[in-house]
Amino acid sequence: MLLARHAAAVGLRARIRLFPGDGAIRDAGQVAMIRRFRERIGSAGRWAFEVPIPLPGDQRALDAVLTVAGGRIGLEFYVRLADCQAQLRAAHLKQRDAELDRMVIVVKATHANRRALREAGPATSDTFPGTTRPLLATLAAGELPSANGVILF
């Protein structure tokens, strides 16, 4: 309560997240999603995980990079879209800074995430025009997608 009052005094809103103390990983949902996605895509291409952005001092990393015939695809996995525009912008900047040919955002197929993508509208569809079925087929074939995209998975 005290933290919330102090934050409000300077125009901020305090948010606290709690995690199990048993040593469980915090991103277990994301790790499971990445594992299922990799199984779905199969052995097409070469996978690398937690790939650092190759800029001195940059602390960002890509969840995965898939190298296929024709280029490198960055993959970012989101269990929950908390701030859709900010998350997509961050992914696009990672694509630029890592000099990737394509960026694919893989989002857990929930009602809340579908709504967030709809509400983001052109911010999503203009920069990430590829859609689930064509992207999955292209990636499973080991080919470079024709455009960036979002996969609901």
Image (cartoon, helix red, strand yellow):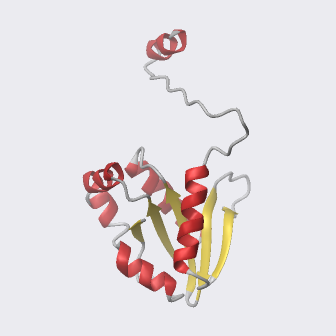
Q: In percent of the image, x 55 and y 67: which residue is there?
A: 36
Asked if residue 97 can be seen in this view, the reply is no
Residue drawn at (27%, 60%) of the image: 122
Q: Position of residue 23 (x, y in %)?
A: 73, 40
Q: Position of residue 67 (x, y in %)?
A: 62, 81
Q: Is residue 142 left or right of residue 110?
A: right
Decide which of 101, 132 is in the foreground and name it: 132
Q: Is residue 19 above or below residue 125?
A: above
Say which of 131 and 19 sits in front: 19
At 57% across and 74% down in the image, what residue appears?
39
Q: Position of residue 145 (x, y in %)?
A: 45, 82
Which residue sits furthest front? 22
Q: Is residue 95 left or right of residue 149?
A: right
Q: In the figure, 4 relative to 16: above or below?
A: above
Give the camera-side residue of 113 and 98: 113
Name the quadrant of the C terminus: bottom left
Q: Residue at x 60, y 66 (%)?
A: 35
- In the depicted structure, whether residue 93 falls above or below residue 116: below
Q: Residue 68: image x %, image y %? A: 58, 85
Mark yes or no: residue 119 visible: yes
The total of numbered circles placed on residues is 0
